[in-house]
Image (cartoon, coloured by chain):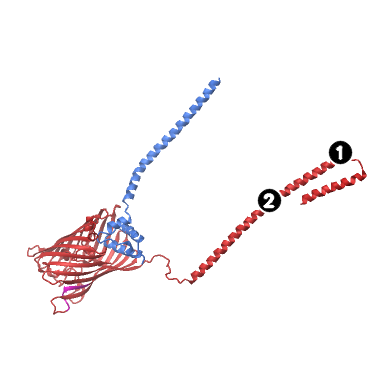
Chain colours: A blue, B red
Amino acid sequence: MKRLSSFKRRFFAGAGLVVVAASLCGLTLTGASAEDKTSKDAKPEKKTEKKAEKKKLTGAELYAIHCNRCHPERYATERSAAQWKTLMVHMRVRANLPAEQAKVILKYLQEDAGTP
Amino acid sequence: MKIRSQILAVLTAGCALGLALPLRAAPVDDEDFKAFKDSVTKRLDLLEKTHEQDQKIIEQDRKVHEQDQQEIQHLKMRLDETQKTATDAQQKAEAASQVQPVHPIPEGPAATHNFMVVGDAEVQFGKVDGSHSGFTLADFAPIFLFRARDNILFEAGFDVRLQNGSTGAVPAHDSGSGTSVGLSFATLDYMYNDYLTFVAGDMLLPLGTYSERAAGWLNKIPDDPMPRSVLPGSGVGAQMRGALPVGASGQSLSYSVYGANGPSSMDITGNSTSLDLGGNVGLKSDGSTGNLHGSPGAGGRVGWFYPWKAHYDLELGVSGQTGPWDDMEHRQWSAGVLDAALHLGPYVEVKGEYIYTWVETDDIGNWHPHGWWAQAGYKLAGLNLDLPLINNFEVVGRYDNLRNFNDAGTIFRKADRYTAGLIYYLTNTLLLEGDYEMASSDDDGLNHNRLVFQFSFGF
């Protein structure tokens, strides 16, 4: 009787452990598949985000693209911030610069502008 | 002390009682002694308890006393610090009151107005075959920029020029020098939004890109390309222009649409020799000044700019203008230009234009002045030679031609010119240019070889 009762105890303890382990596995698999779905959906977004981040040109890059086409590059310290603002209006009209790019170039030049 | 005195008093009383009792010699039984002993013991216990309580109170008072002492020390330290701070502040205030303010820093928003002068200056030394060499040109070309707000700009460019070989003021000389002051352009630019800018005034016309990008220190060869002479460089009118970004790689489309006075006739007629590209405001037959004809010309340009990386880009454009030019408005003048510019790295530049005009005339029928030019430049820094002087040189070359014929076949003129030049960049805006031009033409005025040096400064 004592042996049977100890066996019962061990059996139910083991069964309980199996049930708990199975539940944990089930939860884990369910969560992983959900992550897979979201990660799959997120991958193209991440790719496009990465592409967008890659293609977004900095002020230095836009300056190198536009401001060396017709004349040698001018150094930011040659002018004050206010003068660069005036010059960029002039160049935006003269060189047909898109407004957004002109603003980025202006910010780049003003960061290292000279003091009057 | 109190407890001890109490205990002493009890003992003293006990002794006194003990001394007094033997005279009576009365016997004390055990019960009385025991009761007395219990009473004394109880009293002693009570005294002990009271003593312990008093000791505890004393200990507490001692601790409180220590805390108070610490607090007093802390307050003393803070008082010292406060006094020191007050002293320092007083000293600083006294020092500041003695210092004279030199440049008070203004506060507030940035100014909306700004005025500045940019531009360029050149001096030329030349030698034409068959003539003496000499300084041929001095030019000061300031551009005044006045920004009224973030989106309003007034700009005007002048040419103050001293040129040898022009018709002089002294008739006795075969050739003299003349000083001229001319308005190159003067416009009001109003940026309506990110994609549309209104321009009005004496505009540099967007026929090709040369007229807008041909300042002395930008043009790597001192002369203008020959076919540019068949186009008006500027015109009085109004324009809408702008640029649209395409993607985020720097690519863009640009446009401009304008109306301008256009060419006119110098003598009312529509004869080919009367064509004046400068504009139709002039002297009328009644002696007054005004528009010689009432129909302005119209034109525009569309351009595409594609950079595939920094310093590697291609720009293509197509532009044109049309309108009547004679006073009777019977004759039409039209022009079309294809322009292209290519950069292959920071060292290689190739650009050019193809220009074609159609001119209806009274005397020679339809007339077609046209031509094209192509220019290439290579900065020797691209050779990666470890020689600093070499790195500041740029070799340039240009071919330009001019053709002129009419539909009837009675007129045919041509001119071709080859130019080879070398530029030395003393700084990014100070250039020493030298070029040799070899021109051949059935027009004697264009048939020459010439050596030209130019010192240019952009500011």
Q: Position of residue B105 (x, y in %)?
A: 42, 67
The residue carrying mark 2 is B60
How crowded is the residue under tag 2: few (<14 C-alpha within 10 Å), some, or many (20+)? few
How many marks the image carries: the answer is 2
Q: Which residue lies at the image location 53% right of the left edge and 21% below the top edge? A: A4
Q: Position of residue A75 (x, y in %)?
A: 31, 62
Q: Which residue lies at the image location 56% right of the left edge and 21% below the top edge? A: A2
Which of the chains bears the disc numbered 2? B
Q: Position of residue A66 (x, y in %)?
A: 27, 58
Does residue B261 appear in this view?
no
* Residues rendered magenta in the picture: B161-169
Q: Residue furthest left?
A: B410
Q: Which residue lies at the image location 41% right of the left edge and 65% below the top edge? A: B109
Secondary-structure class at tag 2: helix
Which of the chains bears the disc numbered 1? B
How crowded is the residue under tag 1: few (<14 C-alpha within 10 Å), some, or many (20+)? few
Mark 2 residue type: Gln
Q: Is residue B162 magenta?
A: yes
The image quarter in which residue B337 lies: bottom left
- State the mark number for residue B31: 1
Q: Position of residue B21 (x, y in %)?
A: 90, 45
Question: Considering only vertical position in the picture, is B253 above or below B236?
Answer: above
